[in-house]
Image: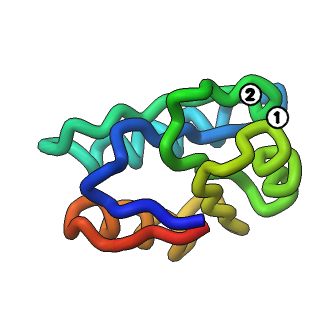
Amino acid sequence: MAIQGTDVRKVVVACEAGMGSSVLLVTQLRDRLKGTEVVVQHSPVSQIPADADVIVCHRGLEATARGVAPGKVVVAFSMFLGDPAFDRVVEAIREGKALEG
């Protein structure tokens, strides 16, 4: 799956039941995407909203996210801080590049 950064309207950070680290990640992504019209929100992986364009989740939840949101771009990360996956998402949106996942 791929999407052009210019077509991204909503990024969903999906996690399991807890919200601690993923809420911090939502805040970081919102800060990095300030000045764009992209909405960044948190969701349990089992309840990803249908209007999500890009789902960001921990690698351990990737298969679940793909099952819940088929046809959507899923970007998996390994580390909550400093993972290059976050840079890829921000760069694609800010520069209008293709984002695969």
Residue marked by disc 1: 16
Q: Quadrant of residue 59?
A: bottom right
Q: Please give left or right for residue 88 compared with residue 84 in the image.
A: left
Q: Which quadrant does the C terminus fall into?
A: bottom right
- Are the residues tagged 1 and 2 within 8 Å (C-beta)? yes
In-front residue for pair 46/69: 69
Q: Amino acid at mark 1?
A: Glu
Q: Please give left or right for residue 28 compared with residue 5 in the image.
A: right
Mark 1 residue crowding within 10 angstroms, few (<14) / some (14–19) / many (20+): some
Q: Please give left or right for residue 55 compared with residue 30 in the image.
A: right
Mark 2 residue crowding within 10 angstroms, few (<14) / some (14–19) / many (20+): some
Q: Please give left or right for residue 1 compared with residue 36 in the image.
A: right
Labels in figure, total: 2
Height in image: 81 above or below 50?
below
Residue at 86 percent across and 55 percent down: it is 63
Residue at 35 percent across and 32 percent down: it is 39
In-front residue for pair 56/5: 5
Q: Amino acid at mark 2?
A: Pro
Q: Residue furthest front?
A: 71
Residue marked by disc 2: 44
Percent position of residue 32, x then y? 28, 52
Residue at 60 percent across and 65 percent down: it is 1
